[in-house]
Image (cartoon, helix red, strand yellow):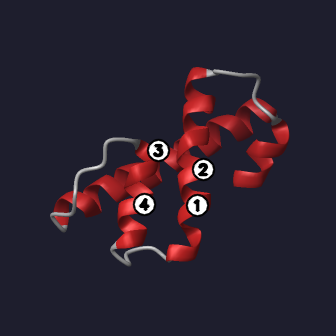
Amino acid sequence: MQLSAERLLHLSIEILLDLGNYLINALSLPKPSTYAEIFKILCEHDILPRDMMNSLMDMARFRNVLVHGYIAIDKKRVYEFS
């Protein structure tokens, strides 16, 4: 069950990052150098609410944990972002 939640969370984050990159390119906004910067740029240009910026950036960083398994994945973090 946890593996399914992790995979679905990973796919959801990837979709948001892909959409964010699409918007950045379409609107000729500054190019991000990290996944987290995608959300920072969108929030700073009022595409996404600024009060969500830190949460979205944390979510993008958590994507790296899901994909690369840098550390043991914390079930609470998976639930928090789901």
Residue 63, image x, y percentages: 56, 38
CA gap between label 3 and label 4 equals 16 Å
Whether residues under marks 2 and 4 lie with C-beta atoms below 8 angstroms apart, the answer is no
| Residue 4 at least partly seen | yes
Nearer the observer, 28 or 4: 28
Horizontal side, residue 69 vs residue 2: left or right: left
Residue matched to label 4? 40
Pick whichever of labels 3 and 4 is earlier in the sequence.
3
Disc on res. 14: 3
Question: Of the numbered discs in the image, which one, if any, rests on residue 6?
Answer: none
The three-letter code of the residue at mark 1 reads Asn
* Mark sitting earlier along the chain (3/1): 3
- Rendered image: mark on residue 54: 1
Q: Position of residue 80 (x, y in %)?
A: 77, 53
Rate crowding at label 4 as few (under 14), some (14 to 19) or many (20 or more) other CA atoms within 10 Å.
many
Whether tag 1 and tag 2 are in contact, CB under 8 A, the answer is yes
Closer-to-camera residue (1/48): 48
Which of the two discs, 3 and 1, sits closer to the camera? Answer: 1
Q: Could you give the CA–CA distance between mark 4 and mark 1, rounded to whole angstroms?
A: 8 Å
* Residue 38 figure quarter: bottom left
Task: Find numbered disc 2 in the image and state the secondary structure of the residue it sits on.
Answer: helix
- Tell which circle, 3 or 2, labels the residue nearer the N-terminal end: 3
Give the number of the disc on residue 58: 2
Asked whether the beta carbons under mark 3 and mark 2 sit within 8 Å of each other, the answer is no
Mark 3 residue type: Glu
Q: Tag count in the figure? A: 4
Determine the residue positioned at 42% across, 60% down: 40
Q: Nearer the viewer, residue 51 or 15?
A: 51
Q: x and y percent of residue 37 in the render?
A: 40, 51
